[in-house]
Amino acid sequence: MLPLMSKVAASLLLSASTLFNPTTPKTLSFDASAYVTTDHQIRLAVQKSAEMPVDVVLRNKSHEVLYQHSIGKKESKYAVKLNVNDLADGEYELEIKSSEGSIVKQLNVSSQPVQQVSRVIAMN
């Protein structure tokens, strides 16, 4: 049997849309990766290649800010784990932004129970 998992399941859509300022067609001077861990935390890592401030913002569907952190100009790397166990079911948005543009990742939190599959194999 598989071990039971928590009833809270979080999924991060990694097919994130990257938004650019149309007048600035260059790539961003920072990159971000995010995924959901097995213990239901969002693991976010940001790496910068230029000295400019970058903001990290987690919002709910009503655009209320639930988490915000500013990465200073001198910091080249930032990593954080955000616990999503206390979030209500629904859609959330994780945005990593600078004056150049932003990376937006969509997050869906649901508390549907994890279903266990049982199989019976009979041999004659």
Image (spheres, rainbow, N blue to C red):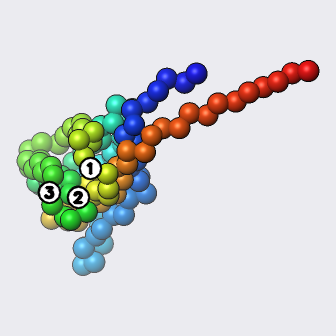
CA gap, disc 2 and disc 3: 7 Å
Residue for badge 2:
60
Residue 65 occupies quadrant: bottom left
Residue for badge 3:
65
Residue for badge 1:
88
Q: Callout 3, which amino acid?
A: Val
* Percent position of residue 79, x then y: 22, 38
- Going from the N terminus, do you reach mark 3 or mark 1 first? 3
The residue that appears at 91% across and 21% down in the rendered structure is 124
Badge 1 marks a residue whose secondary structure is loop
- Going from the N terminus, do you reach mark 2 or mark 1 first? 2
Badge 2 marks a residue whose secondary structure is strand
Q: Mark 1 and mark 3 in contact (Cβ < 8 Å)?
A: no
| Marking on residue 112 | none
* Percent position of residue 104, x then y: 30, 60
Q: Callout 1, which amino acid?
A: Ala
Q: Mark 1 and mark 2 in contact (Cβ < 8 Å)?
A: yes
Taking the image as shown, residue 122 lies to the left or right of residue 38, namely right
Q: Residues within 10 Å of mark 1 (few under 14, many from 20)?
A: few
In front: label 3 or label 1: 1
In front: label 2 or label 1: 1
Taking the image as shown, residue 99 lies to the left or right of residue 94, namely left
Q: How many badges with numbers are in the image?
A: 3
* Percent position of residue 85, x then y: 27, 39
CA gap, disc 3 and disc 1: 14 Å
Q: Callout 2, which amino acid?
A: Asn
The residue that appears at 48% across and 38% down in the rendered structure is 114
Task: Looking at this view, name the residue that lies furthest to the bottom.
Answer: 23
Q: From what the image shows, is residue 70 above or below residue 26?
A: above
Between residues 104 and 48, which one lies in front from this camera angle? 104
Q: Residues within 10 Å of mark 2 (few under 14, many from 20)?
A: some
CA gap, disc 2 and disc 1: 9 Å
